[in-house]
């Protein structure tokens, strides 16, 4: 078939790649001048099944309530005139029970582990350089009490097969000597040795080049304006450069998916959550991080992409606003500099803000809604890079009428 993929982020490009492997003709539509220029560009770059916990937990309502008063919260809720914020927030709150959080976390972990296995297949098949680091990810805590709670929390994923190692502070410094000067600030941590990192934009652009080499088409600078239907299916996708027709269509527009789905009367429970990141050159600094880490007290994540650090923090309910100012990055930069004082040229940090496409239960939207040839692969939230490859294979399987390799119970609406 000729399949039109709406969106050129990591989810859209990996989907096109898997569809092409199945023998389909693929066309990717992307509004930016190159693929992976939005959410896929500025994220933490972590392939992290060990970070599969959903945000919709019993603790979330109080955190959001506190953020209305306290300005330094990692999860920030801002009052807005947007009615979609409140309807989405109500659905989110309905997922914040202990039972649902456990269920959704295990579903998310199932998808994340499967997706990592598909990534490994792609890496084995394709020669792609994306600054991969397969030494795992370190999740560390600043007090013994927090560490104990973190270990207890992580037992859920361990029960589902996640490999974890609990480390004392000396073992953490031995694992990454760049944390030596911060030794006394760390009580201990959890090392997930099978987690990994890599630059998602670099990967996505290299994979997109493979798709084009094999006959696929990528139309950048093309803004999708709507979908035209005929009877029970999609007739064409409307863009600012005219209509684009195919036999099947995949909606993979991240945070913008509900805006396009709405044009055909389909409501998607996806809301944009704003995240902030810094990209910092290592320069000639002698002690950059050697392994990705998350400071669980401050919820600041640090990854090393070759000669750069990627630092991410904060989740803000701010609608489609991606504006930012230097003050937004002061805290995350300060935490990183405290942990790795000789880790990077902090004065040369590049600031970025972008949107995470969040669903209330933190699980992506798959399958079809009403229109026989329109498929959804969207709403991957804060670990879209982790879940992208498995989601792409699942979508290709659904389009082919095949049963996906993992159980879709709970994942397919």
Image (cartoon, grey):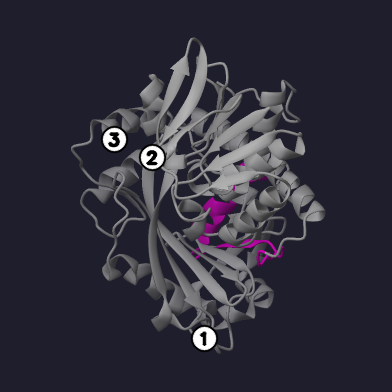
Give the residue at x 53% y 51%: 149
Question: Residue 81 appears in which quarter of the rendering?
Answer: top left
Question: Residue 79 appears in which quarter of the rendering?
Answer: top left
> Closest to the observer: 237 or 286?
237
What residue is shown with label 2? 240
- Which secondary structure lies at badge 2? loop
Residue 94 appears in the rendering: no
Image coords of residue 298 (percent x, y): 42, 62
Give the residue at x 57% y 65%: 293
Tag shown at residue 342:
1
Please give the range of residues in magenta: 130-158
Image coords of residue 272 (percent x, y): 37, 42
Image coords of residue 38 (percent x, y): 45, 53
Please state the total of marks drawn on the protein image: 3
> Closest to the observer: 254 or 240?
240
Give the residue at x 49% y 48%: 382
Q: What's the distance in space between the residues labelled 1 and 3, CA to CA?
A: 41 Å
Question: Residue 239 appears in which quarter of the rendering?
Answer: top left
Q: Residue furthest front?
A: 242
- Disc 1 residue crowd, few under 14, some 14–19, many 20+, Cα 10 Å: some
In the rendered structure, which disc, 1 or 3, sits on the residue that comes first in sequence?
A: 3
Q: What's the distance in space between the residues labelled 2 and 3, CA to CA?
A: 28 Å
- Disc 2 residue crowd, few under 14, some 14–19, many 20+, Cα 10 Å: few
The quadrant of the picture occupied by the N terminus is: top right
What residue is shown with label 3? 85
């Amino acid at each position: 078939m000729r399949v039109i993929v709406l969106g050129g982020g990591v989810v859209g490009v990996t989907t096109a790649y898997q569809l092409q492997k199945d023998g389909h003709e693929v066309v990717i539509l992307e509004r930016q001048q190159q693929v992976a220029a939005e959410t896929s560009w500025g994220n933490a770059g972590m392939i992290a099944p060990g970070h599969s916990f959903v945000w919709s937990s019993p603790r979330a309502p109080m955190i959001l309530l506190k953020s209305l008063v306290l300005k330094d919260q990692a999860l920030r809720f801002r009052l807005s005139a947007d009615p979609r914020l409140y309807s989405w927030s109500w659905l989110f709150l309905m997922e914040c029970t202990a039972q649902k959080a456990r269920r959704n976390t295990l579903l998310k972990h199932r998808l994340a582990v499967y997706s990592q296995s598909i990534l490994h297949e792609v890496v084995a098949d394709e020669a792609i350089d994306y600054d991969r680091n397969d030494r795992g990810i370190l999740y560390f805590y600043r007090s013994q009490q927090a560490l104990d709670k973190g270990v207890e929390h992580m037992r859920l994923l361990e029960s589902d097969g996640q490999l974890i190692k609990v480390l004392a502070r000396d073992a953490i410094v031995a694992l990454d000597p760049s944390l030596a000067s911060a030794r006394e600030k760390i009580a201990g941590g959890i090392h997930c040795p099978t987690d990994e990192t890599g630059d998602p934009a670099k990967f996505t652009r290299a994979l997109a080049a493979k798709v084009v080499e094999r006959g696929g088409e990528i139309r950048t600078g093309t803004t999708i304006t709507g979908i035209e239907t005929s009877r029970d299916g999609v007739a064409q996708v409307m863009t600012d450069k005219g209509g684009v027709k195919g036999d099947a269509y995949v909606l993979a527009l991240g945070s913008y998916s509900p805006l396009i789905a709405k044009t055909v009367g389909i409501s998607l429970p996806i809301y944009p959550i704003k995240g902030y990141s810094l990209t910092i050159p290592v320069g000639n600094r002698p002690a950059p991080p050697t392994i990705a880490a998350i400071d669980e007290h401050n919820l600041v994540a640090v990854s090393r992409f070759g000669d750069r650090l990627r630092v991410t923090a904060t989740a803000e309910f701010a609608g489609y606003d991606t504006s930012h100012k230097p003050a937004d990055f002061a805290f995350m930069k300060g935490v990183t500099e405290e942990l790795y004082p000789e880790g990077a040229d902090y004065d040369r940090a590049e600031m970025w803000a972008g949107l995470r496409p969040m669903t209330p239960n933190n699980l992506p939207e798959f399958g079809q809604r009403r229109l026989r040839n329109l498929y959804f692969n969207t709403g991957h939230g804060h670990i879209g890079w982790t879940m992208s490859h498995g989601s792409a294979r699942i979508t290709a399987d659904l389009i082919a009428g095949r049963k996906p390799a993992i159980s879709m119970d709970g994942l397919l609406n």
